[in-house]
């Protein structure tokens, strides 16, 4: 497994798994670490948007170079990904993850985990059912689903 974090360049050498989902300025649990750790023995590149040098004071504007770089990196990474793993942490609102769900619901790339307690779980469930996006209810089930997908 190779892990690439934003905003590092993305290679095209292997299968790519993008870790979409709750970050919310650090309010969410670090679920990305659990998923990446489960993939260490596989020939896969994990694309992790959880940027080590993120600065919450950056203005979220297209005119802010660092912010735009982050969003562009994430959009490119999702486009290149073979699989998009999406986690909705019940302790967060995660509006960007909802946006990403809308962008990729029809793609066939999604594995979605939306546990009970997430404030818009009903919406996520309906979208996943309508567009046949794979859905699980726990982090452990998410990890199992991703490993199964990577194994082929």
Image: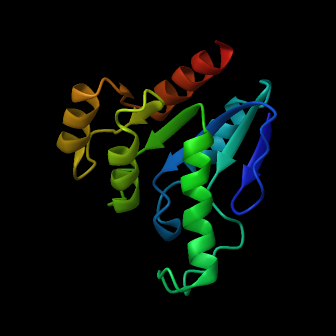
Quadrant for the N terminus in the image: top right
Q: Relative to the observer, which residue lies in front, 139 or 75?
A: 75
Where 30 sits versus 113, above or below?
Answer: below
Q: What residue occupies the far top of the structure in this picture?
A: 152
* Image location of residue 24, percent across then percent down: 46, 65
Apparent side of residue 91 relative to residue 47 in the rendered image (left or right): left
Residue 85 percent location from the top left of the image: 51, 37
In this rendering, position of residue 149 left or right of residue 42: left
- Colour setup of the view: rainbow
Q: Position of residue 4 (x, y in %)?
A: 75, 50
Q: Which residue corresponds to the image point at 44% horizontal and 43% vertical from the top-left?
A: 87
* Place of residue 90 in the rendered image (x, y in percent of width and height, measured from the top left): 34, 51
Query: Quadrant of residue 91 in the image?
Result: bottom left
- Left or right of 125 on screen, residue 80: right
Q: Is residue 50 left or right of residue 87?
A: right
The C terminus lies in quadrant = top right
Q: Nearer the viewer, residue 18 or 79?
A: 79
Most foreground residue, 114 or 78: 78
* Residue ID at (33%, 38%): 115
Seen at 28% across and 31% down, the residue is 128
| Number of disc labels | 0
Is residue 145 placed above or below 61 in the rendered structure? above
Which residue sits at x=19%, y=34%? Answer: 126
């Amino acid at each position: 497994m190779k892990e690439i974090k934003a905003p590092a360049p993305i290679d095209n050498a292997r299968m790519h798994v993008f870790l979409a989902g709750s970050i919310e300025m650090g309010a969410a649990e670090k679920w990305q670490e659990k998923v990446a750790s489960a993939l260490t023995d596989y020939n896969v590149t994990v694309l992790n948007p959880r940027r080590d040098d993120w600065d919450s004071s950056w203005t979220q504007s297209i005119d802010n170079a660092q912010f735009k770089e982050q969003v562009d990196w994430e959009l490119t990474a999702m486009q290149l990904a073979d699989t998009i793993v999406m986690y909705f942490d019940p302790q967060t609102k995660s509006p960007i993850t909802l946006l990403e769900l809308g962008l990729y619901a029809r793609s066939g790339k999604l594995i979605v985990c939306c546990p009970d307690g997430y404030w818009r779980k009903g919406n996520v469930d309906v979208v996943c059912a309508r567009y046949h996006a794979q859905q699980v209810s726990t982090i452990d089930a998410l990890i199992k689903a991703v490993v199964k997908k990577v194994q082929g």
